Image: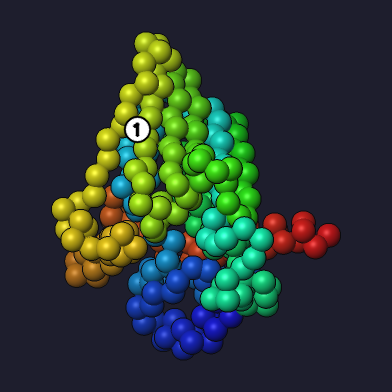
Amino acid sequence: MDTHGSSTGPSVRAGKAVFIEWPLVKDYEKAIALTEKKRLDNTIIGLQGHVPPIVLELKEILKSRRIGRVLSSDVRAYGNLGTRGKVSEGLSYFADREVGGKHITIAYGHTIDYVHELAKWKVGIADGATLSFAFRNGQQFNGTPGFVWTIHSESGEIMVTANGAYVHSDSYKDPIEIKLHDHSTDEIIDVGWDWEDWQKELPYRSRIVAELYERFGRWWSERKARSDLPDDQEWPRLHDAVIRMEEFDELFKQYDA
């Protein structure tokens, strides 16, 4: 994170195609310096939570208005990357704020980003709908899910559960479930989802990142204008990451106050 800007800056300024892992850079100031607040369409930011099948399935449910407009949503997530009470040597940089990579920017950052992704299109979401998000660094209560996301709507409710919040990465050692409670029938429905056949040939951590490359490659080969891209062909770029960096800038200002 602390070297992302210096290592990729020359390529970005030269208009080259660039992939940068999230977090984009150390902080919002450096994000502005890197991108100059410009649209950078021939880039990818590693916020692959925009495109996993779980998120895509939720988008389709909301777009269909199957359970009416969303009124509120609640997320409980745990940064269960390590053991209780200590940080592993490999993640020791999480304790150094100057680096820019830590549980809050990485674990929470990826998760809040794909939650925001559903709200971004404002399809099937009521005006004034609220979001509450509780993130705790460390392990969840033993035997309970490490990630629970509920979406409350006019005529139903969705619940997503997983062993961790990393539906953008590798929280797939146990099944990730989507359940829908239809208030009109009081029935609870298991919502199915699946990987594309080509994704099943890849390790879990590679599957969703590969989808970013697929979308970028399709756009690159066809040279389509940004405005021509439907939602199912979009991918996150560097300028999208700046929005999330600004959100963290506000968060850390509140912490420092």
Image: 226 above or below 122:
below
Is residue 227 at all visible to an observer of this figure?
A: no
Q: Can residue 162 be seen in this view?
A: yes
80 relative to 66, above or below? below
Which residue is at 39% across, 74% downward? 19
Residue closest to the eye, 42 or 118: 118
The image quadrant that residue 255 belongs to is bottom right
Q: Give the quadrant of the N terminus.
A: bottom right
Please indicate whether residue 162 sits to the left or right of residue 139 in the image. Answer: left
For mark 1, what is the residue?
A: 61
Say what secondary structure mark 1 lies in.
helix
The residue located at (46%, 84%) in the rendering is: 8
Identity of the amino acid at label 1? Ile
Query: Does 143 sit left or right of 198 as displayed?
Result: right
- For residue 57, which quarter of the picture? top left
Q: Which residue is drawn at 57% across and 60% down?
A: 83
Drawn side of residue 94 relative to residue 146, left or right: right
User: Which residue is the extreme one toward the right?
Assistant: 257
Q: Please give the name of the residue rendered at 45% of the width and 54% of the height, measured from the top-left corner.
A: 166
- State the image coordinates of residue 151 (x, y, percent, origin top left): 49, 32
